[in-house]
Each structure stands twice: as structure tokens, then as C-alpha cells.
Amino acid sequence: MTHHKRKICFVITSFIHYSRNFLILEELQKRDDIELHIVVGGAALLPKYLSKFMNIKEELEHSGFKNIHDAYFNLEGNDGITKAKTAGLGTIEFSTIFGVIKPDLVLVRGDRFEVLAAVTAAAYMNIPVAHIEGGDLSGTLDESVRHAITKLAHIHFVTNDDAKNRVLRMGENPDYVFNFGSPDVELVHKTMNDSLLGETDFDMTGSGAHIPLGTDFLMVMYHPVSTEVGTLGEKTKILLEAVHEIGMPALWFWPNFDAGAEEISQELRKFRDNTNDHGIRFMRYLPPKLFLSLLKNTKALIGNSSAGIKECSYLGIPVVMTGTRQQRRLHAENVIEVPHNKDQIKNAITSQVKMGRYPASALYHGEDTAKKIATVLATTQLYIQKTFYD
């Protein structure tokens, strides 16, 4: 009698899902009791979000992954209605794909609207869901989506104890809530000593200023907050002026695909095309190890990316966090929070660069995170009917 391999379907709808979870994918791929399927969908398939360096499907194929499925459902547009419709189309598309794959378990990460679409489809099809990074606070619509996914998920891999307690307060069964630390931070830990900086020619990707190798540089990652659409252009302008006036070369990453991204991108393009002698290079996504090589060598990370909260805490990189996107998220002492005010942003950047490295924080670090997650996914008893656990 042949033993049934557990069929696990991992959903990737953004570059981040790929870059921060490939250790988990590798661990699942290694196991002979798992048949791994990967659905690449949403913004992860859109050419405008990929760079010469980075095509997620090609990277996965190149790394030896099989059973890769495409999910096309993104509507072009910058506002809430296109995101709501995209989520609806996503539910339709994912239900079709799950109907073909017939997975035993669907694995998702985070709080994006496309992830909610996948989880909704799985819930109605009686497919158990495992969720990475539930219970975090972030202060935007994403937070509601994250908690909604928690209530639809059956197995929870939280990244810190505060998050674990919140998931338990939401009535989840403690036998299915695991804190093995953050997969993002484990990736940093494992690639600490790889440096790819020597082989990176920044002029190959992105546009804007030429930044010679060996220069001190800042990094900026500024993403939209969907509840602040309409004011994001102004906020981007303030941040651009602050970074520009500091005068240190900067690598500025284009925003993700959330509502309001176009407002930010428009300001970046205007600045790039109309400002002379600036030191900013505008970058698309890079492969994870290359991105981490940059992060390890930057003088400070500025903006509102969770990389400032997680990866940078472990690396001790000084961070200037602006706005509400990561508000209330558990962070180490390497983070200074400032409002959207040019002088306050400039002062914070100056003092953080002067400060230099902070001591490494183990706030989000666990041992063997990916391996433990893969083991639970492969061996834990699955169930479909959830009950509120008092």
C-alpha cells in the first residue's frame, strides 16, 4: 500500500512571500512525506514589479521547485475598488486552482488582500489553512485582514510571544499555535556571512543616480497605507526632500502593489526626472541574498517597511520609521519613529547614521525556524471544523 504524501500548497502573491520564505520552501522540498505545490499569483506575476534580476517563477524553477501554478487576477488601478475586485477575482481563481490541485493544506503568509482571497477559497472548500505571521499589530487595514486570516486558519506560526498571546485571545486552540521565531530573521542569520556586494553593479538595475561601489549609502522602503490614499503623494515628497537634503547616496525601492502605490510612484518619477544632481537610485526588487547584502551594509534604513522591524533588529541596522504603517509593531531599540515632518526625519537620519550599529536583537529570532515549521506542516494532525477556544 502506498503511503499518501501530504499535499501542501504555498501561495506567493508578492515578492516578499518568496524572498522571506524560501528556507521553508527548501525544507518542505527536502521532505519525502510532502508533495509541494506553489501558486504564484497577483503582483508576483506582473512584469512591472519584477526586475532583470528577479523573476519569481524563474527563480523557483531555477531552484528546482516543481508543481508551480499561475494565478492571474490583478486589476490595474490605484484605489480601494480595484483592490476589492482583485480580492474577489482572486477568490474565484484560487478556488479553481485548489479544485485542480486538491491540496491537504494551504500555506499562506502575512496580511495582503490577495492572501485573504486564497484563504476565503480554502475555507469554503474545507481545506485546512496554515498561516505565518499572525497576531502582529501594524496599524493599517492590513491588521484587520491579518486577524481575519487568523480566524480562518487552522495552524498558526507566529513570530513573537506578544503575537502568540493575541492569537490565543482570539480564541485559537493553543495546540495549533507555534512560536518558532521569524523566518525572515532566520534567513538573515543563515546568510550573515555571504556578501554579494562585490558582484553587484547597481547600474544594471533601477534608474537615477550612479552609486559607485564602496560608497556609504542609505536605503529607503516606503509603501502605501491604504487608509491614507490621497495624502501619500505629499508624504512621499516630504520624505524625498529629507533624504535628498541629507546628501548621502540612497537606494530607494519602488513601493509594493497596495492601494495608493501610484501616488508614491508618481512623486518618485517626478523627482527622478526633474531634480538635478541628486544621489538617489530607484530600485526594483532584488533576489533575497542580494537584498540582504545591501541591508547589511547600509548606514540606515528609512521608511515604513517591516524589514526595519525584523531583519534590521537582528542586524542592528539603525532604522528611521515614518508614518503609521508599522505603528504598534513590536520593535527593538534600533528603531526611531518620527512623523511626516522633514526636519524631524532629517534629524533622525543624522543621529541614526552617527549612532552606527546597534547590538543584535533576538526579538524575532528562533532556532531552526523553517525546519520546525516544515515538520509541523508535514506531521501535525489536520482538522477542518474550528471552534472558539475559551
Image: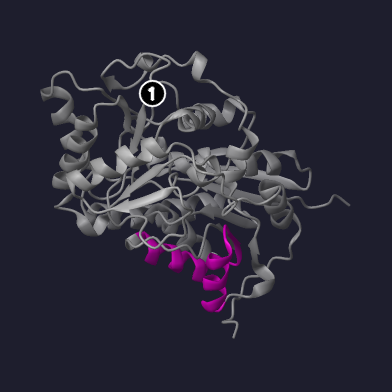
Q: Nearer the viewer, residue 196 or 260?
A: 196
Q: Position of residue 304 (x, y in %)?
A: 34, 48
Check disc 1 and report its element: helix, strand or loop: loop
Left or right: 33 as drawn, with respect to 370: right
Q: Nearer the viewer, residue 62 or 126?
A: 62
Whether residue 243 appears in this view of the structure is yes
Q: Position of residue 321 (x, y in %)?
A: 34, 49
Please say whether residue 154 is one of the residues in the magenta stretch: yes
Q: Residue at x 78, y 52 (%)?
A: 4
Tell me the quarter of the picture where residue 141 sits. bottom left
Q: Nearer the viewer, residue 123 or 27?
A: 27
Q: Position of residue 281 (x, y in %)?
A: 29, 24
Q: Quadrant of the C terminus?
A: bottom right
Where 167 sits versus 272, above or below? below
Q: Which residue is mark 1?
A: 216
Please say whether residue 183 is one of the residues in the magenta stretch: no
Q: Amino acid at mark 1?
A: Asp
Left or right: 33 as drawn, with respect to 25: right
How does the figure colour the protein chain or chains? Answer: one colour
Q: Position of residue 76 (x, y in %)?
A: 25, 42
Q: Residue at x 56, y 49 (%)?
A: 361
Find the magenta span and give its range: 142-171
Where 284 sits versus 9, above or below? above
Whether residue 255 appears in this view of the structure is no
Residue farthest toward the left in the current orientation of the protein = 274
Tell me the quarter of the picture where residue 55 sits. top left
Specify the principal SS of the magenta part: helix
Residue farthest toward the right in the current orientation of the protein = 1
